[in-house]
Amino acid sequence: MSNTTQLLRFITAGSVDDGKSTLIGRLLHDSKSIFEDQLSAISKTSEKRGMAAVDLSLLTDGLQAEREQGITIDVAYRYFATPKRKFIIGDTPGHEQYTRNMVTAASTANLVVILIDARKGVLTQTRRHTFLASLVGVPHIVLAVNKMDMVDYSEDTFNAIVAEYRAFAAQLGIHEVTCIPMSALNGDMVVEHGDNLSWYKGAPLLEFLENVAIDYDVNTADFRYPVQWVCRPQTQEYHDFRGYMGRIESGEVAVGDEITVLPSGRTSKVKGIVAYNDKLQRAYAPQSITITLADEIDISRGDMFVKGGGNPPRVEKEFEAMLCWLAEAPLDKNRKYIIKHTTRMVKCLFSHLDYRVDVNTLAHHETDKLNMNDIARVAMKVQQPLVFDHYQHNRATGSFIVIDEATNNTVAAGMIV
C-alpha cells in the first residue's frame, strides 16, 4: 500500500437496533480486516448468548456497558484498509441523549452512513441524525436501507423509503444522497453484491467508499495558516533562524507568495518552506510545515497567514454561531468562558441566546438556558479579535470549542454562521 493512500473518515448513524455495529462488523469481516483471535473471541461470546451465527456487532461494541445493554453508548472507532484507501470508522450512538457524541464524531468526518431499518422506514431519529450531519457540514451522505432481508428484498419498499428521505433532506439543502439497499446480517451489498438484490444496479457500500471523491472536501482555494509555534532554535547553526510552525488548514502556499498576517494586517513574502528538514517550493492543506518570511514581523501563536484574493476571512470580536452544549452543567450566561479557535485561545461571553433547535422536529424555541445535548444559535463576544470564515465555507477556521476556565473541561462545540 502506498504511503500516499487517501484516508477516508466516516461515521455510521441511525436509530437503536438499525444495525450500525453489525454493518461495521460486516465491513471488517468481509474485507479480511480482523484478527483470528478477535473472531474467536466474538464467536465464543455469540455461542454463550445462544446465537446460531457470529454476532459481528461485538467487534465495535467494546465497552462492557454496551455488551451488557446491547447498545452503543460511546463513539467506537475502528481502523481498516483496502488496497485503494485507508478508513477510520466511527460507530456513533443512536440514543438522543448521546447527541453530543455524534456531533463530535461527525465534525471531522468526510462521510456519514445513515442507516434505516427497512421495516420501520424514516424515523424521528433518522431526521435528527441527518440534521446533525448537515449542521456540521459532512460533505457526503449515504442512506443505507438495512435489513432488506426482513422485507423480502422488496424494491418498492426501498423506493418508498428513498423518496421520503430525499424529500426531507431537500428541506435541509441536501441534494446529493447515495442510497443503497443492503442486509448487513447476510452481507448483501456491503462488500459483495450478494444474490438477493439483483434489481439494484449501484455499487456495494465498500466499493462506493473506496471511490467517492474526497479531494475537494478541504477548501483548496483560500489559504489559511494559523501559527502554532514560533521556532527560534538556540544553536550556532540556526541562531538567525525564525520560522513559523503550523498546519495549512486550507489552500496552498509557495515560495515567493505575498502573505498577510492577521489580525495585525502586516504583509511579507514567503522566503522558505520546510517540512521534516526538506525544503519545499510549494505546500498544500493539510500539510504541517514551517514558513520563513522575508521580513521581521511581530508574530505570535494564534496569528493567521492568508493570501489576497478569493474570500477574505472576517476579523471580528463579535459573531453568531450554532452551538452544541456538551457539558452536564448547563450554560451560565453570566460567566466568562474560553474559546479555542484554531491555535488561539481567548476569553468570551455569551451575549444572547437566539433560539434552541428541536433536533427531532427542527422547530426553533426561545430559550434562556442550554443543557447537555442542546443545540442553539447564540451570539458571542470575545476579548481579542478572531480570524474566521463561515463554517460552511471552511470547517477548519469556522469551528471552535468552548472551555470552562475553572475546570479546563470542554463544554461546547461551535460552528460560526
Image (tube, rainbow, N blue to C red):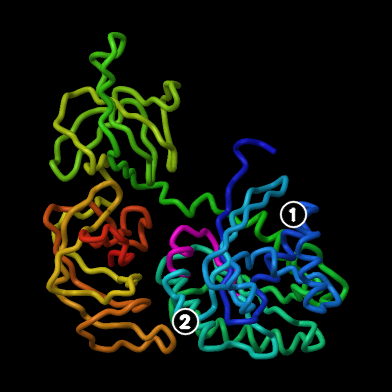
In percent of the image, x 41 and y 36: which residue is there?
Answer: 288
- Residue 201 seen in this snapshot: no
Q: Does the segment drawn in magenta span residue 28? A: no
Measuring from the top left, give residue 267's x and y in whole percent. 18, 34
As measured in the structure, the alpha-carbon distance from the residue carrying label 1 to the one carrying label 2 is: 30 Å
Q: Is residue 352 above or below residue 360?
A: above
Residue at (54% x, 82% y) in the render? 126
Tags 1 and 2 in contact by the CB under 8 Å rule? Answer: no
Residue topped by disc 1? 34
Q: Is residue 312 left or right of residue 154?
A: left
Q: Mark 2 highlights which residue?
A: 96
Residue pushed farthest top?
236
Q: Amino acid at mark 2?
A: Glu
Can residue 371 be seen in the rendering of this structure?
yes
State the SS at label 2.
helix
Relative side of 151 to 72, left or right:
right
Label 2 environment density (alpha carbons within 10 Å; few <14, some 14–19, many ≥20): some
Residue toward you, 348 or 364:
348
Along the viewing direction, whichever of 192 and 306 lies nearer the viewer: 192
- Seen in the picture, residue 146 relative to 261 is either above or below; the reply is below
Q: Residue at x 62, y 57 (%)?
A: 78
Q: Quadrant of residue 332?
A: bottom left
In the figure, is residue 24 to the left or right of 152?
A: left
Range drawn in magenta: 102-114
* The C terminus: image quadrant: bottom left
Q: Nearer the viewer, residue 251 or 372?
A: 372
Q: Is residue 261 above or below residue 213?
A: above
